[in-house]
Amino acid sequence: MMTNIQAELERLLKQEQDLQFTTFTNETAFEIGTRIIQKAQQEQKAIAVTIVRNGELLFHTKMNGTTADNDLWIKRKQGVVHHFGHSSYYMHVKFKAEGGSVEGACLDPKQYAAEGGSFPLLIKNVGVVGTISASGLPGDQDHQIIASVLEEYLGAQ
């Protein structure tokens, strides 16, 4: 029998398989980032959003109510995606299930955070080329706002 945690891990892996791009331009980054901000505005939530491709910052904006701490959270969550190749929320759930941690993986918690809010920027037949990240909400909600916008965007293509 499958546990809830196993089901959640499988759901998150399926998101990563499904939410992949064939190409990702600077304009795509602007559109995705803007849609995430608009969704947060509709829900009256304050977030910071950062999109990076191949080490290049393509999109970054912060709503009123966010601080420099949100930028630090984004950097730490991005580090987890780059290290493990999975969303920071997937790693959060996985670590919780297995009793692991970034420290247990020999990573500096000042540079890595296994909390929801950084999603791998995946190109079909290429792999992870960057991150789409948000900070300002609880981790599962940071993750969900990104995933829901990617589902809408990629479903419409």
Image (cartoon, rainbow, N blue to C red):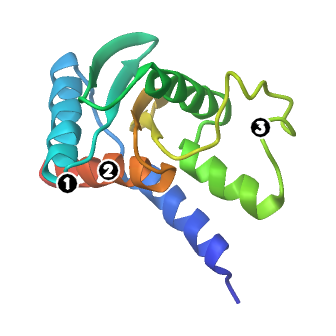
Residue at (20, 37) in percent of width and height: 37
Cα separation, mark 1 vs mark 2, equals 10 Å
> Which structural element holds mark 3?
loop
Residues at badges 1 and 2 in contact (C-beta under 8 Å)? yes
Q: Amino acid at mark 3?
A: Val
Residue 43 on image: x %, y %: 19, 54
Residues at badges 2 and 3 in contact (C-beta under 8 Å)? no
Relative to 107, say whether 55 is above or below.
above
Residue 145's mark?
A: 2
> Which structural element holds mark 2?
helix
Residue at (13, 51) in percent of width and height: 42
Q: Which residue, given by chain and number where applicable, does mark 3 sit on?
A: 102
Mark 1 Cα-neighbour bin, 10 Å: few <14, some 14–19, many ≥20:
few
Q: Which residue, given by chain and number where applicable, does mark 1 sit on?
A: 43
Which residue is nearer to you in this view: 128 or 90?
90
Nearest to N terminus: mark 1 or mark 3: 1
Mark 2 Cα-neighbour bin, 10 Å: few <14, some 14–19, many ≥20:
some
65 displayed left or right of 55: left
Q: Quadrant of the N terminus?
A: bottom right
43 displayed left or right of 126: left
Q: Amino acid at mark 1?
A: Glu
Residue at (12, 52) in percent of width and height: 156
Q: Amino acid at mark 2?
A: Ile
Numbered disc in front, either 1 or 2: 1
Cα separation, mark 1 vs mark 3, equals 31 Å
Residue 11 on image: x %, y %: 50, 66
Numbered disc in front, either 1 or 3: 1
Single out the residue that lies furthest toward the top.
Answer: 56
